[in-house]
């Protein structure tokens, strides 16, 4: 029986007639972040609905289905299936079916429609206005036509960036409850992003300096962490180019690795700092749109870090620049 439940993809536990966990598969141990074998089910899962279902099945047999939510480290939703087993001895089976992705899909669909319809309204209205002008007053005006076509291209590119960012954010949120299993080096990512953005930095007159040479190996997804570092450096180039320099530093701190992107631009007022990772929050809406911003960059960073069980700290002082520090659990030296 232990071998059987160990091969199944869902978290499963077997209880004896006293409610003690006789066996639990690897998925259950990962979910509970502990080995529950030998403990009473109430010590492993503190959910009244499941405990009541177990008691009912112990007393009356049959099966029960109840909802179970896990709030830490991330919100997850399960359907708990509790059933009596007569053979080989009186035991109780608890199977937890993960419904997180299904519920997130419904929520993200609604969020996407709401956000997309709101944010796309302005550029669509502009495009319609330009088209009406080109069909009317500027129909034969070559100078006006070229100018309006350039503006229409700008608005179309803005809509494309917005849709791309919304889709990216949706994909990340869809997998937020699944922690990446691979390993990657934040130092290598920093050098990779610096080379990728060298043209943008040169055009803005900004020098990107990296003073860390030691590996910063973390448990994470290369592509997603590249997106984190790229968003932070791009923001520094776009909004803090007046500082002429961006410094990237990293260090191993206890069980975590830190990477800091610091600029020497105008800085950010303190009242804005707590809201910077909100979707579509902009300090200056007009400036953000002129620079091609969608208001989703730091929201994407936050959700990627949540998936990696990481955090971000933002520090800034008006006139002295800003620093964005990401902290992600490191891979132990033994694991490497």
Image (spheres, rainbow, N blue to C red):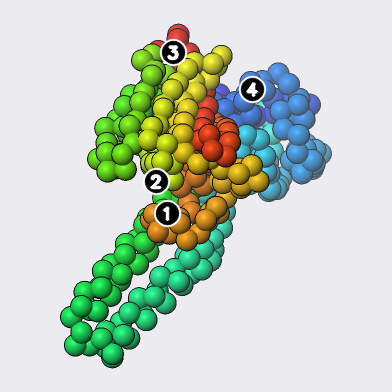
**Residue shown at the point (42%, 77%) measured from the top left:** 125
Task: Classify residue 151 as left or right of residue 218.
Answer: left
Whether pointer 2 and pointer 1 mark residues with C-beta atoms closer than 8 Å, the reply is yes
Q: CA distance from mark 2 to mark 4?
A: 45 Å
Q: CA distance from mark 1 to mark 4?
A: 43 Å
Residue 90 versus residue 116: which sits nearer the camera? 116
Whether pointer 3 and pointer 1 mark residues with C-beta atoms closer than 8 Å, the reply is no
Which of the 4 image quarters holds residue 281?
bottom right
The mark nearer the N terminus, 1 or 4, is 4
- The residue pinned by badge 2 equals 238
Whether residue 184 can be seen here: no
The mark nearer the N terminus, 2 or 1, is 2
Residue 190 percent coordinates (x, y): 36, 28
- The residue pinned by badge 3 equals 335
Q: Secondary structure at mark 2?
A: helix
Residue 225 versus residue 124: which sits nearer the camera? 124
- The residue pinned by badge 4 equals 34
Question: Quick check: 294 above or below 263?
Answer: below
- The residue pinned by badge 1 equals 293
Answer few, some or many: residues within 10 Å of disc 4's Cα (few below 14, many 20 plus, some between 14 and 19). few
Looking at the rendered structure, which numbered label has been put on residue 231? Answer: none
Q: Secondary structure at mark 3?
A: loop
Residue 293 percent coordinates (x, y): 42, 54
């Amino acid at each position: 029986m232990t071998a059987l439940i160990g091969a199944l993809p869902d978290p499963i536990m077997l209880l004896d007639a006293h409610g003690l966990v006789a066996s639990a598969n690897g998925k259950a141990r990962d979910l509970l972040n502990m080995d529950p074998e030998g403990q009473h089910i109430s010590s492993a899962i503190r959910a009244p609905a499941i405990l009541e279902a177990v008691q009912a099945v112990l007393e009356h047999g049959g099966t029960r289905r109840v909802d179970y939510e896990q709030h830490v480290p991330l919100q997850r939703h399960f359907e708990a299936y509790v059933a009596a087993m007569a053979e080989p001895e009186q035991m109780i089976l608890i199977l937890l079916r993960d419904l997180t992705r299904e519920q997130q899909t419904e929520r993200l669909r609604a969020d996407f429609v709401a956000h997309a319809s709101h944010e796309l309204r302005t550029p669509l209205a502009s495009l319609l206005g330009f088209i009406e002008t080109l069909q009317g007053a500027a129909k034969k005006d070559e100078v006006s036509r070229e100018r309006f076509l350039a503006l229409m291209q700008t608005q179309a590119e803005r809509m494309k960036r917005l849709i791309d960012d919304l889709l990216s954010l949706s994909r990340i949120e869809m997998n937020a409850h699944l922690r990446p299993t691979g390993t990657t080096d934040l130092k290598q990512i920093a050098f990779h992003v610096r080379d990728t953005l060298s043209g943008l930095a040169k055009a803005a007159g900004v020098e990107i300096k990296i003073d860390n040479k030691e590996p910063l190996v973390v448990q994470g997804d290369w592509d997603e962490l590249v997106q984190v570092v790229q968003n932070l450096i791009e923001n520094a180039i776009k909004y803090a180019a007046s500082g002429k320099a961006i410094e990237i530093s990293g260090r191993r701190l206890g069980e975590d690795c830190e990477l800091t992107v610091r600029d020497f631009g105008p800085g950010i007022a303190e009242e804005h700092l707590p809201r910077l990772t909100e979707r579509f929050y902009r300090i200056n809406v007009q400036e953000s749109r002129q620079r091609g911003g969608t208001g989703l960059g730091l929201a994407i960073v936050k959700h990627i870090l949540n998936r990696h069980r990481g955090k971000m700290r933002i520090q800034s002082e008006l006139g002295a620049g800003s620093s964005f520090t990401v902290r992600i659990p490191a891979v132990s030296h033994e694991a490497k």
